[in-house]
């Protein structure tokens, strides 16, 4: 039975791989023609591939403001903790200049949307063609070894780190403590899901945010504090 399940898994991945180049080309060309980040968000939500999409787990108003922040601060070296569907990654790749470098770390499996299927590695790289350099790392972000690997792949400190992986209080704090060490002077971090909501959605991030924001200049991008989740907190380091 286990062997049959494994065979079905790889056959399914092979089928997705065959269609990924055409889907990626459509998304890449359409995104390049789009005149705004808002248009690219609508594109990501509308265009699907066999049930999969690059739909971001974001409130439109909030992610638009974060993308604007990346441009204003001229971020070039970017780290994303938590790739999930790749929706936020897709938007960042098109908001950053071609000479930027994005390193996205995701745990295979795991709660809070972790663990994209193998075929999506090809999709993400194809979508990134002609834009910023993209490096995808699989494994736990919460080890010094992975933190050091991220910095090595990045080739130096990060201008920006987005913490959107393990949403447990301990996990999010661990990501904060590890990756703040590789942020360049004048750089910044952002945390997703700072608005209180159901535990399975936001975990302990709202609690962590209330603690760490006391010690740093910060900004909160929140459409409504009554929305039951989401929200982005920006922390200057």
Image: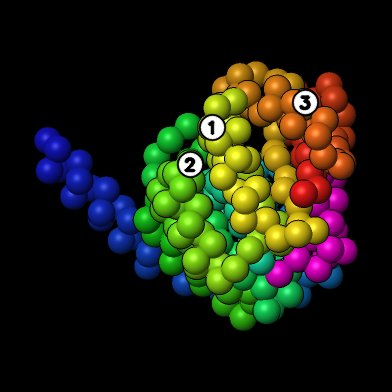
On screen, residue 99 above or below 61: below
Residue annotated with mark 2: 142
Lower position in the chain sequence, tag 3 or tag 1: 1
Lower position in the chain sequence, tag 3 or tag 2: 2
Where does the image place residue 21, in percent across and percent down from the top left?
47, 72
Q: Residues within 10 Å of mark 1 (few under 14, many from 20)?
A: some
Q: Which mark is residue 237?
A: none
Main SS of residues in magenta:
helix
Dot 1 falls on a residue whose secondary structure is helix
Magenta part of the chain: 61-76
Residue 121 visible in the snapshot = yes
User: Image quadrant of residue 208?
Assistant: top right
Compared across the picture, whether 92 is left or right of 235 comes to left
Q: Are marks 2 and 1 in contact (CB under 8 Å)?
A: yes
The structure residue drawn at horizontal position 33% and vertical position 60%, both measured from the top left corner, is 15
User: Image quadrant of residue 91?
Assistant: bottom right
Q: CA distance from mark 2 to mark 1?
A: 7 Å
Marks counted in the figure total 3
Q: Nearer the viewer, residue 44 or 79?
A: 79
Residue 60 visible in the snapshot = no
On screen, residue 225 above or below 186: above
Q: Residues within 10 Å of mark 3 (few under 14, many from 20)?
A: few
Magenta segment: does it hold 191? no
Q: Which mark is residue 210?
A: 3
Q: CA distance from mark 3 to mark 2?
A: 21 Å
Residue annotated with mark 1: 171
Where does the image place residue 78, in percent across and percent down from the top left?
65, 61
Dot 2 falls on a residue whose secondary structure is loop
Q: Are marks 3 and 1 in contact (CB under 8 Å)?
A: no
């Amino acid at each position: 039975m286990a062997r049959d399940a494994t065979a079905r898994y790889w056959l399914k991945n092979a089928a997705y791989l065959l269609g990924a180049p055409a889907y990626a080309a459509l998304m890449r060309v359409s995104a390049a023609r789009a005149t705004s980040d808002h248009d690219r968000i609508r594109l990501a939500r509308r265009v699907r591939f066999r049930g999969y999409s690059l739909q971001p787990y974001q409130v439109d108003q909030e992610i638009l403001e974060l993308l604007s922040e990346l441009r204003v601060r001229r971020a070039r070296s970017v780290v994303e903790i938590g790739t999930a569907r790749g929706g936020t990654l897709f938007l960042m790749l098109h908001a950053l200049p071609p000479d930027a470098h994005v390193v996205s770390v995701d745990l295979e499996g795991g709660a809070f949307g972790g663990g994209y299927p193998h075929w999506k590695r090809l999709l993400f790289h194809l979508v990134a063609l002609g834009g910023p350099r993209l490096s995808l790392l699989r494994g736990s972000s919460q080890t010094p070894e992975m933190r050091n690997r991220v910095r090595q792949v990045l080739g130096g400190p990060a201008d920006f780190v987005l913490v959107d992986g393990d949403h447990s209080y301990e996990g999010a704090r661990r990501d904060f403590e590890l990756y703040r060490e590789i942020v360049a002077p004048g750089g910044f971090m952002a945390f997703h899901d700072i608005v209180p909501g159901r535990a399975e959605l936001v975990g302990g991030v709202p609690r962590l945010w209330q603690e760490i924001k006391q010690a740093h200049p910060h900004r909160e991008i929140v459409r409504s504090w009554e929305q039951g989740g989401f929200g982005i907190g920006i922390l200057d380091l």
